């Protein structure tokens, strides 16, 4: 598969802490031109949260973008054309495949060489690696990978690779130059100005081939 170079992750907790409705945020991100959007909801899946997901799924389909659901293989199976992203503590990819079937796109997070090597034998379509830089959006982050290690580990897998963790508009190109196919962004989707669409447009410009 070919991943867009800009990979926004809509974390509902981050959005709500900024006073932003997740559905509104998704609409702004997609209207700005994002071609992929991950829905990450770490808390209890209430009726309200499931309603957000259903609305975001409709918005994503209307934008002809890819919706990726974090953690939940059962939800990825329920939502039409959704992809699935798994972490190291989630359902193993082999087991998730039995839930979502062979045609669903599945991504898998890794944090070091051992995990990346192990992931190469899993039935997944792309990998994520990080944190590349320090991050504040995870309570107990894994040790920082760094650019040199990203460059080295990139050679261990032919799968598309998403760099995540502490990615900013200033260092995104460094991660791409080090071998990442895509960069994931969470907190920096929400500027102090509140103009999500302008921020995402800036991200797309920064990560485009030939960008700054």
Image (spheres, rainbow, N blue to C red):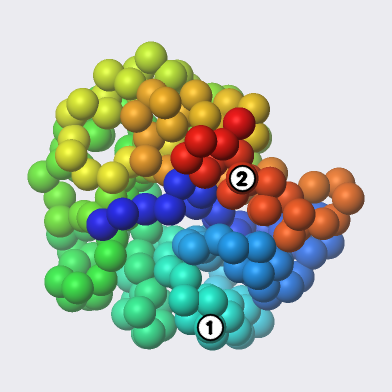
Q: Residue at x 37, y 53 (%)?
A: 3
Quick check: 165 left or right of 32? left
In the image shown, does 145 or 151 lie closer to the viewer? 151
Q: Image height check: is 135 above or below 186?
A: above
Residue 107 found in image quarter: bottom left
Judge from the rendering whether residue 159 lies leftward or rightward of residue 78; answer left or right.
Answer: left
Crowd class of label 1 (few under 14; some 14 to 19; many from 20; radius 10 Å): few
Label 2, on which residue? 205
Residue toward you, 141 or 147? 147
**Which residue is labeled 1 in the image?**
62
Q: Residue at x 83, y 61 (%)?
A: 19
- Taking the spot 67% from the left edge, 58% from the top edge, the residue there is 13
* Quadrant where the N terminus is found in the figure: bottom left
x, y (%) of residue 116? 24, 34
Residue in the image at 38% along x and 35% along y: 180
Whole-percent x and y of residue 4? 43, 53
Label whose residue precedes the other's in the sequence (1 or 2): 1
Residue 209 spot, x, y in % from top left: 47, 40
* Farthest residue, direction front: 210
Work out which residue is located at the far right of the displayed protein and give it: 193
What is the C-alpha distance between the residues marked 1 and 2? 22 Å
Q: Secondary structure at mark 2?
A: helix
**Res. 98 in view:** no
Task: Locate residue 201 relative to residue 37 in the image: left or right.
Answer: right
Instruction: Please tell me whether mark 1 sits on a helix, a strand or a loop.
Output: helix
Above or below 86: residue 65: below
């Amino acid at each position: 598969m070919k991943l867009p170079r800009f990979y926004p992750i809509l974390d509902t907790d981050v959005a709500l802490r900024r006073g932003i409705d997740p559905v509104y945020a998704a609409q702004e991100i997609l209207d700005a031109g994002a071609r992929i959007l991950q829905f990450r909801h770490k808390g209890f899946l209430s009726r309200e949260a499931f309603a957000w997901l259903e609305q975001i799924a409709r918005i994503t389909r209307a934008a002809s973008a890819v919706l990726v659901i974090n953690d939940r293989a059962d939800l990825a199976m329920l939502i039409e054309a959704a992809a699935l992203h798994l972490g190291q503590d989630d359902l193993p990819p082999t087991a998730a495949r039995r839930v979502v079937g062979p045609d669903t796109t599945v991504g898998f997070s890794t944090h070091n060489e051992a995990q990346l090597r192990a992931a190469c034998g899993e039935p997944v379509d792309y990998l994520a690696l990080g944190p590349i830089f320090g991050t504040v959006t995870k309570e107990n982050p894994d040790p920082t990978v760094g650019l040199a290690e990203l460059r080295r580990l990139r050679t261990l897998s032919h799968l598309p690779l998403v760099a995540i963790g502490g990615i900013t508009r200033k260092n995104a190109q460094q991660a791409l130059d080090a071998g990442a196919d895509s960069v994931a962004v969470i907190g920096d989707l929400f500027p102090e100005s509140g103009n999500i669409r302008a921020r995402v447009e800036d991200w797309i410009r920064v990560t485009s081939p030939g960008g700054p």
